[in-house]
């Protein structure tokens, strides 16, 4: 469903991605692991055009694009098929929880308000926040904000959800509630591409693992294989430190 | 206090208040509304780094912040007739005050736009919204909340600055006080009196600012 080939990205003299390939099939939960500075977040941001890659190709649903030369119209169209969950939640600060979920439906997808609110209520119910619909982000805990962000993502019925370190900004006691919601999504067959430091989550929930370091993919494969029989020494060392090598 | 003075104070009060309500306030309201349109447009153009328009905005702000308001009033009212542009005092004052205020407020709004976290725009994109949709629905409302106290400040300053319009023959509140003084010559009480009416106007605006901030700030309230 999503295939990225030979993606390169530099910030000034610093080359962050040095030719990365990535494949996500429908229904896959792909975890991208790696130490800090390995380029995993940049990869995710390039895939959703939040950063413009210098070169590479991207195929989505059989459509092929040359990265760095994707027309704005196509970017907008592709983004409507995807959703993005940020490390820092990025909820719309001037909107309530429910409005955060319905905003994209009403404004971008031109859905009638009543229908959007119905979907919004169901999405918030699904992440266990039906009693927080009218709260503003400033009135919610980090874990609650991230669950609203996930509700915002699923309400759009995307073909894939990108997660950028969704629990890294949370206190340890709050990561559990967010991971539980993500686990449920995975069980329902949602296609997910997740940059994470949560090895436990990657091990038990993801179907595929991509291990990155220094802007390249060191090793990729089925999650069980990577965790139990890593081929590369670097992967093994990283997994042994418990992913704490940030 | 002698009876004559008391009589002057009481007698002049409606004569000062009337031009206040009929000239000072409309001048301020019209000019400030236009200034807001200019400020938001100039701030958005600069924030979006629209080529050419951004440079024009910088030039405009440079000129109007860098020269005295009084000089601007004189150039437009007394100067422009030399090139065939003759304006009545009131419209001339509206034009100068809105351009001058617009230049200052454009900077306030631009700074407030820059202060909105970058993630808000990205979140808008990822929700499928366009740049303009995200600006209108998410970024600008947050920026206006941030800018509100500064803009209120500018508005209050402007109420008082409209007294400068007396120099281009606009019969606003201060000019009215001057005219009364010319006949009775009681500068101390009359200028204090007109000052108190300005203070009254400013006080009302300060009170309205408080209400506005509470209303706009609903989303920033923490759960108690």
Image: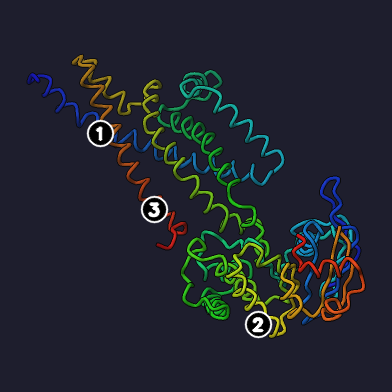
Which residue position is annotated with label 1? B18
Q: Which residue is mark 3?
A: B214
State how far apart marks 3 and 1 are (Cα): 31 Å
Neighbours of disc 1 within 10 Å: few (<14), some (14-19), many (20+): some
Q: Is residue B201 left or right of residue B167?
A: left
B2 or A58: which is nearer to us?
A58
Q: Is residue A55 above or below residue B39?
A: below
Label 2 lies in what chain? A
Q: Residue furthest left?
A: B3
* Dot placed on the residue nearer the N-terminal end, 3 or 1: 1
Element at badge 3?
helix
**Which residue is disc 2 drawn over?**
A184
**Residue at 50% in and 60% down:** A138
Above or below — where is B98 with respect to A119? above
Mark 2 nearby-residue class (10 Å; few <14, some 14–19, many ≥20): some
Q: CA distance from mark 1 to mark 2?
A: 69 Å
Q: Position of residue B105 (x, y in %)?
A: 51, 38
Q: Quadrant of the N terminus of chain A?
A: bottom right
């Amino acid at each position: 469903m999503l295939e990225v080939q030979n993606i390169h990205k530099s910030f000034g003299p610093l080359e962050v991605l040095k030719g990365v390939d990535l494949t996500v099939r429908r229904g896959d939960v792909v975890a991208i692991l790696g130490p800090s500075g390995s380029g995993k977040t940049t990869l995710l941001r390039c895939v959703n055009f939040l950063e413009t890659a210098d070169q590479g190709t991207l195929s989505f649903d059989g459509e092929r694009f040359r990265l760095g030369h994707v027309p704005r119209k196509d970017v907008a169209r592709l983004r409507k098929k995807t959703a993005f969950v940020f490390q820092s939640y990025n909820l719309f600060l001037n909107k309530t929880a429910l409005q955060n979920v319905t905003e994209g439906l009403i404004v971008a997808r031109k859905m009638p308000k009543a229908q959007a609110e119905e979907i919004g209520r169901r999405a918030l119910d699904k992440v266990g926040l039906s009693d927080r619909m009218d709260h503003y982000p400033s009135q919610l805990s980090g874990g609650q904000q991230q669950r609203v962000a996930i509700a915002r993502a699923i309400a759009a019925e995307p073909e894939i959800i990108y997660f950028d370190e969704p629990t890294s900004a949370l206190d340890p006691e709050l990561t559990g509630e967010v991971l539980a919601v993500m686990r449920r999504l995975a069980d329902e067959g949602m296609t997910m591409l997740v940059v994470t430091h949560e090895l436990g989550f990657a091990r038990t929930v993801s179907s595929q693992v991509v291990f990155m370091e220094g802007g390249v993919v060191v090793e990729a494969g089925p999650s069980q294989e990577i965790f139990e029989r890593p081929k590369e020494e670097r992967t093994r060392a990283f997994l042994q430190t418990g992913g704490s090598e940030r | 206090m002698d009876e004559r003075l008391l009589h002057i104070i009481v007698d002049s009060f409606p004569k000062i208040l009337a031009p206040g309500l009929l000239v000072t306030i409309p001048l301020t309201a019209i000019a400030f509304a236009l200034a807001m349109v200019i400020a938001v447009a100039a701030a958005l153009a600069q924030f979006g780094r629209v080529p050419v328009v951004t440079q024009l905005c910088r030039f405009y702000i440079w000129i109007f912040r860098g020269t005295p308001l009084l000089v601007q009033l004189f150039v437009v009212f007394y100067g422009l007739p030399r090139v065939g542009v003759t304006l009545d005092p009131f419209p001339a004052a509206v034009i100068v005050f809105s351009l001058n205020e617009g230049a200052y407020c454009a900077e306030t709004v631009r700074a407030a736009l820059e202060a909105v976290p970058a993630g808000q725009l990205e979140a808008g994109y990822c929700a499928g919204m366009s740049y303009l949709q995200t600006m209108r629905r998410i970024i600008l409302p947050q920026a206006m909340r941030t800018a509100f106290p500064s803009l209120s400040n500018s508005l209050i300053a402007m109420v008082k600055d409209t007294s400068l319009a007396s120099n281009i023959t606009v019969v606003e509140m201060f000019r009215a006080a001057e005219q009364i003084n010319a006949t009775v010559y009681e500068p101390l009480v009359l200028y204090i009196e007109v000052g108190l009416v300005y203070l009254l106007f400013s006080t009302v605006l300060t009170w309205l600012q408080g209400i506005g901030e509470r209303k706009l700030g609903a989303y920033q309230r923490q759960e108690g």
